[in-house]
Image: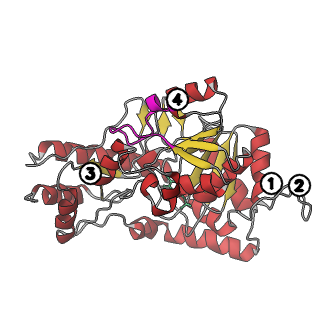
Amino acid sequence: MQVPLLNLKAQYAPLRDEMRDAILEVMDSQLFVLGNQVKALESSVAQYSQAKYAVGCASGSDALLLALMALDVKSDDEVITTPFSFFATASAITRTGASPVFVDIDPDTYNLDASQLEDAITSRTKAILPVHIYGQCAEMDPILDIAMRHDLPVIEDAAQAIGAEDQGRRAGSMGLAGCFSFYPTKNLGGAGDGGILTTSDERFAERLRRLRTHGGLTEYEHIEIGLNSRLDELQAAVLNVKMKYLDGWSNRRASLSANYTQLLTNAKISFEVVPPVVREEGRHIFHQYVIRVPNHRDSLMLHLKECRVGTKVYYPIPLHRQPCFQYLGKKEGAFPETELAARETLALPMFPELTEEQQVYVVDSIKSFKP
Ligand SMILES: *Cc1c(COP(=O)(O)O)cnc(C)c1O
């Protein structure tokens, strides 16, 4: 047996005909930028995410950048975020000229620890950027409460969390805006790069639309300097097909995850393996199923590779330890829970087409590791 970390071909196979028709329709129309496919996707993602508006763009990274640009974040400003995320969360901040200010994570959920948030706010703080890591929402109530008291906007990095919920509220509906990615490996993945923002603020949505088209609302007249960051019709066509299946896939991920946790709990493994902690008041969409292995994480990973089980570490280098961010002056030890998570976490194979037999093999392979 072998179990890949991810299997996009298994998702594509049953959609092949539907996908070909959708792509051919765009080709026949010869309309490639900001047409009906993008409009349809914007309206279904807005509705799906409990937001009034959605604005497509070229990537999740650009969605973050556009949101910060629309807030007029610039040099000398600070944006508070987590050091335990994909690189783009922090680089979007630095792209505006502002500085990321990191707050350590909750070791259970790997999301920003709201109890440390208020201490990080200064007179230069312009926004708070929590990430819903692995598909589980950050605990938003304390974050929203602190933001409100300090009159600060919250931008959700929901790149891994489309359809995730916190107390019935969907990712992308709780802050001023939510930023999503359609990178092919995400839960809703395109055939290349793509992204979208959600917001219920009409003026903010309008500003985002302007910023994604070079700061112009009409052609060739530019009110401000924006980006060229649009979602292609071909991407939107692919995503419109997949959108119908998203809830089924997310529910399947959740049931596979519950099965993993049960298998791991019953397996009597000789070393410590901690399954993911799922907050009861939320909906976790399991973009990743991540275990914590306090000792021997790296040797377990090698062992699983020999068993032909795909695993990966998200993310091995915390953002404050990235070479390009050393100018921020955050040394090893600055964010201990983040650094520990980077050393101890391991993502197991997770995709809707994974089978229960494959899961048994993954857990048996973990069990057969002798530290
Ligand atoms: C994938 C991801 C992004 C960036 O999205 P791209 O579409 O790859 O640019 C940003 N933040 C997080 C947390 C992500 O996982």
Start-end of magenta stretch: 102-119
Residue that numbered label 4 is attached to = 118
Distance from the alpha carbon under mark 2 to that under mark 1: 9 Å
Whether residues under marks 2 and 1 lie with C-beta atoms below 8 angstroms apart, the answer is yes
What residue appears at the point 60 percent right and 43 percent down from the top-left corner?
79
Give the residue type that dot 4 points to: Glu
Residue that numbered label 1 is attached to = 210
Give the residue type that dot 2 points to: Ile
Asked which secondary structure carries label 3, the reply is: helix
Ligand 1 under 8 Å from disc 3 Cβ: no
Residue that numbered label 3 is attached to = 344
Distance from the alpha carbon under mark 3 to that under mark 2: 49 Å
What residue appears at the point 42 percent right and 67 percent down from the top-left corner?
8
Q: Compare marks 2 and 1 and give the one earlier in the sequence.
A: 1
Distance from the alpha carbon under mark 3 to that under mark 4: 27 Å
Question: In the depicted view, which residue is nearer to us: 17 or 270?
Answer: 270
* Residue 117 forms part of the magenta stretch: yes
Q: Compare marks 3 and 4 and give the one earlier in the sequence.
A: 4
In the image, taking residue 148 as reference, residue 167 lies left or right, namely: left
